[in-house]
Image (tube, rainbow, N blue to C red):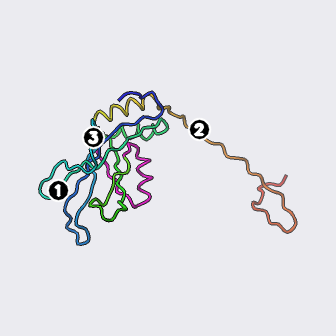
Amino acid sequence: MTGIEQTEVSLTMGLVVERRPSSHPWADAIWRPVAAYLVSDPTIPNWTVLREADGVTRYHAGTLLLTLHRKDTEALRLNLMLDQPELYAILQENIERDSPFPFLPHALTASSYEAQDFHDSGDDIIEKLPMPEPVAAFIQAFVELHHNEEPFKKRRRDKLDVEEQKFGKMPVFKPLRQQ
């Protein structure tokens, strides 16, 4: 994990997705991201079973890149201020109907702003996950190097330009005083 001096860096992360039985009559299972971790071997096949117990199966759903960009440091900084920093995992619906996996890992982000953009579509599963300590330390170093606090600038209002009244045209604003 080096190279934080670059304006955009990526960490290779694994996503763990859990499948558990559903009691709902229209769904046989509930799929939910439950963890993200730093991957030492990015060649792990997608949907590798990690653990099975009591009808609950955990899979290594896929390997994703957690990309940090210097323009996102405000959102990253706010995330690191939380008691428990978070990662956001996004699953999208699998368009292959014959697949045993109804969702596919799509993205992993540390920016709540980016997660909100995915949330606005309403079609994705977005889940908050705890951020591993080494990832939080890496993001903290990245933010410290690239974040520039912009001072608040109060914008001055433009002066109102009252147009003169012309024949057949009512003024938009009535002048307070005549000149």
Mark 2 element type: loop
- Residue shown at 70%/47% (left/top)? 158
Contact flag, marks 3 and 2 (Cβ < 8 Å)? no
Residue 166 image offset from top left, x and y in percent:
86, 63
Front one among 93 and 22: 93
Front one among 154 and 119: 119
Which stretch is magenta? 108-130
- Residue shown at 37%/32% (left/top)? 140
Q: Mark 2 is on which residue type?
A: Lys
Q: Give left or right: position of 151 versus 102.
A: right
Would residue 103 be counted in the magenta stretch? no
Residue under numbered circle 3? 37
Residue 111 image offset from top left, x and y in percent:
41, 44
Mark 2 neighbour class, 10 Å CA radius: few under 14, some 14 to 19, many 20 or more: few
Mark 1 neighbour class, 10 Å CA radius: few under 14, some 14 to 19, many 20 or more: few
Please name which of the two marks, 3 or 2, marks the residue nearer to the observer.
Answer: 3
Residue 177 appears in which quarter of the rendering?
Answer: bottom right
137 lies above or below 34: above
Residue 1 image offset from top left, x and y in percent:
35, 30
Number of numbered tags placed on the structure image: 3
As measured in the structure, the alpha-carbon distance from the residue carrying label 3 to the one carrying label 2 is 40 Å
Mark 1 element type: strand
- Choose the circle earlier in sequence order: 2 or 1: 1
Q: Residue furthest bottom?
A: 25
Residue under numbered circle 1? 56
- Residue shown at 78%/57% (left/top)? 175
Residue 91 appears in which quarter of the rendering?
Answer: bottom left
Q: Mark 1 is on which residue type?
A: Val
50 lies above or below 149: below
Q: Mark 3 is on which residue type?
A: Tyr
Mark 3 neighbour class, 10 Å CA radius: few under 14, some 14 to 19, many 20 or more: some
